[in-house]
Amino acid sequence: MQYTERVSRLESEGAFVVLAKAKQMEAEGKSVIHLQIGEPDFDTPRNISDAAVKAIYDGQTHYAPSGGIPAAREVAAEYMAKTRNIKLDWENVIIMPGCKPLIFCAMIALINDGDEIIVPNPGYPTYRSVTKFLGAKPVPIKLREENDFRFRLDEFEQLITPKTRMVILNSPENPTGGILTWEDLEGIYALAKKHDLWILSDEIYSRIIYDVDFKSISSLPGAMERTIAIDGLSKTFAMTGWRLGFAAMPKKLAEYMFTLAINNFSSTATFTQYALIEALTGPQDAIDDMVLQFRRRRDVIVEGLNSLEGVSCLKPEGAFYVFPNITGTGLKSKEFADVMLEKAGVACLSGTAFGEYGEGYVRFSYANSVENIKEGISRIKKALAEVGKVKA
């Protein structure tokens, strides 16, 4: 049997690979602290679940329009307009089963074979993977620790060529927790406009932010003419398994996305869209509490990591990840992650799972209890001491 060459270009995602290995270790009776997976450890707020259950009992279990039911699109458009301070109609917004289909379909609609796409590195693996799948070239822009893991505008400009078609932003960012400043966004938009680039802005962590206000490039005058601003319910509302994402974009692109949805998955589950309406319009107390707990956990894990010999860690301003520098341990990123899982029973991800510029770093998710985070730090400290003795 034969397979297409393009499918071989797709890459896996390290978090799920490590999760499978950690689960196997647990099945063998070993204790594992999960600090690898990017998933809130909270339950979906009850009012949201109740809205979905009610919709099921009300018979909302049939096909929906491929771009989303109008009521949900209106609510998502109002939410995006309010949180980004922009004007939108419901026709500007598409709802899909998660943010990955939105990323995939937008890139299918906009990228041709041979195009170049500027992607953050270290960055979310899907950006690079889909670019390669489409026969385009991912051009990495290095997110540097000394620049708080943000774009350097001079480097961004140097990467733009006549083949550049799109730049991808992720702020707050996975895996670093870094956030682009208003000045960064203004500079990126100016260059995108000058060179006629599309901007794909992945803003899934827009509500999980601690010390600064959220800023979207879509808020800049004129930016929505070339921007796809993506958000969803997975992270903010602890709804990863519900698969609900939405994005604002130019109406013409939304029409193409609608057609792509028809040809791919037909529609997003109808009853879940009633949960979306409740999530975006109902009480927000549970979200505020979740973010407060994430803030406390962030402070605990940053302090703990900085107490380890050979490890240093910036305090992230958003998301629920830390991206410590581990070069002082003498271990490579993959080696560090393997040692921590096998010797310490602490699951984390090698920085290289997010691109070549992730070497020298690892990613920890602090979507876990303070108690488990503290225990994880204690185990890491012991494992590093053991490795040190072995090397000596």
Image: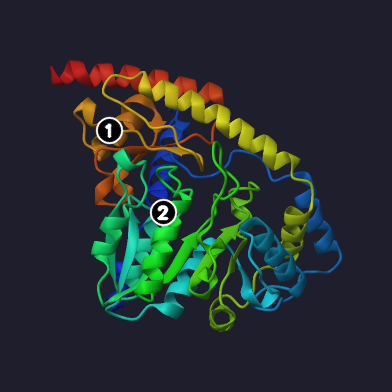
Q: CA distance from mark 2 to mark 1?
A: 33 Å
Residue 123: x, y in percent?
37, 52
Instruction: Report the label total.
Output: 2
Discs 2, 1 touching: Cβ within 8 Å: no
Please state which of residues 13 and 4 is positioned toward the viewer in this rendering: 13
Which residue does the numbered mark 2 point to in the structure image?
184
Looking at the rendered structure, the kind of residue marked 1 is Phe
Q: Indicate the amino acid at tag 2.
A: Asp
Q: Is residue 36 above or below residue 120?
A: above
Q: Position of residue 217 (x, y in %)?
A: 50, 60
| Residue mark closest to the camera, 2 vs 1 | 2
**Is residue 129 placed above or below 240 in the rendered structure?**
below
**Which residue is located at x 33 percent, y 50 percent?**
122
Give how far across and how far down residue 344 sits, in percent.
Answer: 36, 25
Disc 2 or 1, which lies upstream in sequence? 2
Residue at 68% across / 35% down in the picture?
289
Instruction: Please state which of residues 325 and 271 is positioned toward the viewer in this rendering.
Output: 325
For residue 164, above or below residue 27: below
Q: Residue at x 72, y 40 (%)?
A: 286
What is the secondary structure assignment of the residue under circle 1?
helix
The C terminus sits in image quarter: top left
**Nearest to the observer: residue 322 or residue 126:** 322
Is residue 135 rendered to the left or right of residue 365? left
Residue beneath disc 1: 336
220 relative to 130 in the view: left or right = right
